[in-house]
Image (cartoon, rainbow, N blue to C red):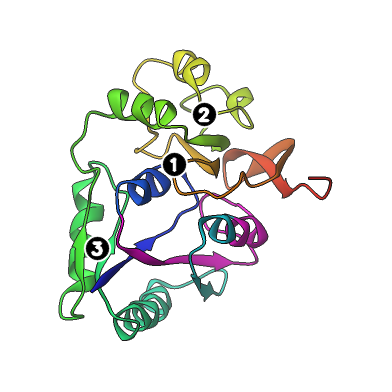
């Protein structure tokens, strides 16, 4: 049996993937052509999956999306994972107990077991382990109420970590920031991403990302 991984396009999912050798598929959600919360265009997520050599199951969501509809559509993705032979779903969650409990409730009775390979790891050390492992990511959005808006669009690196205000989680697990991974363990080649202007979306400072056509 094998595992599918819940793919957010960010560093936590990518690092969790690098710790596994049994992942045969990724699944993600897309609304209005973008990954919710991260705001990354679908074509970039498809480019990640292509570089990783893994099939991507895209859950199309309406926008706005009522929770009942979200659960109905994600349940279909989980059924597809089970039908494809998976017995495990891997998540990149770090320490938010309510999120973990929700995942566990969602998978109850599906024949799929949730696994959390990063759970409980100290996030300061984890962030630096990600960088040391060769993971390369762009900070696609930040919460300007908790950290400087000008950090949107920057690389997720030691310089970025040093610039974080006191109280901001180094992995952004409380929603302080989100990332898009362009390279790292398992990638056959870097995803050619271009970082554009920073704007505002849903209260977040968001760097517009695109697929480089010159690469």
Q: What residue does disc 1 label?
A: 11
- What secondary structure is marked by label 3? helix
Q: Considering the image in quadrants, where does the N terminus appear?
A: bottom left
In primary-sequence order, the first of circles 3 and 2 is: 3
User: Closer to the camera, 191 or 150?
Assistant: 191
Mark 2 Cα within 10 Å, few/some/many (few <14, many 20+)? many
Tell me, yes or no, if residue 92 can be seen here: yes
Disc marking residue 103:
3
Q: Which x, y percent locates residue 208?
A: 70, 43
The magenta segment is 21-47
Q: Are marks 3 and 1 in contact (CB under 8 Å)?
A: no
Query: Residue, x 49% and y 70% (percent of image)?
Result: 55
Q: Which mark is nearer the camera, 3 or 2?
A: 2
Distance of mark 2 from mark 1, alpha carbons? 9 Å
Q: Which quadrant of the structure image shows residue 76? A: bottom left
Q: Is residue 142 visible?
A: no
């Amino acid at each position: 049996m094998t595992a599918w991984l819940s793919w957010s396009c960010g560093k936590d999912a990518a690092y969790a993937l690098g710790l596994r050798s049994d992942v045969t598929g990724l699944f993600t959600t897309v609304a209005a052509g973008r990954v919710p919360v991260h705001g990354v265009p679908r074509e970039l997520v498809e480019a990640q999956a292509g570089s990783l050599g893994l099939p991507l199951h895209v859950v199309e969501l309406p926008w706005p999306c009522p929770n009942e509809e979200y659960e109905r559509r994600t349940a279909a993705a989980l059924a597809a994972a089970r039908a494809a032979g998976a017995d495990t779903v891997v998540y990149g969650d770090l320490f938010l107990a309510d999120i973990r409990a929700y995942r566990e409730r969602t998978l109850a009775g599906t024949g799929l077991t949730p696994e959390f390979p990063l759970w409980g790891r100290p996030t300061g050390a984890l962030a630096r382990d990600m960088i040391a492992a060769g993971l390369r990511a762009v900070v696609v959005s930040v919460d300007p109420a908790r950290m400087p808006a000008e950090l949107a669009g920057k690389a997720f690196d030691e310089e970025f970590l040093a610039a974080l205000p006191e109280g901001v989680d180094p992995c952004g697990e409380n929603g302080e920031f989100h990332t898009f991974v362009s390279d790292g363990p398992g990638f056959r080649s870097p995803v050619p991403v271009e970082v554009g202007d920073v704007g505002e979306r849903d209260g977040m400072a968001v760097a517009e990302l695109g697929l480089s056509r010159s690469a």
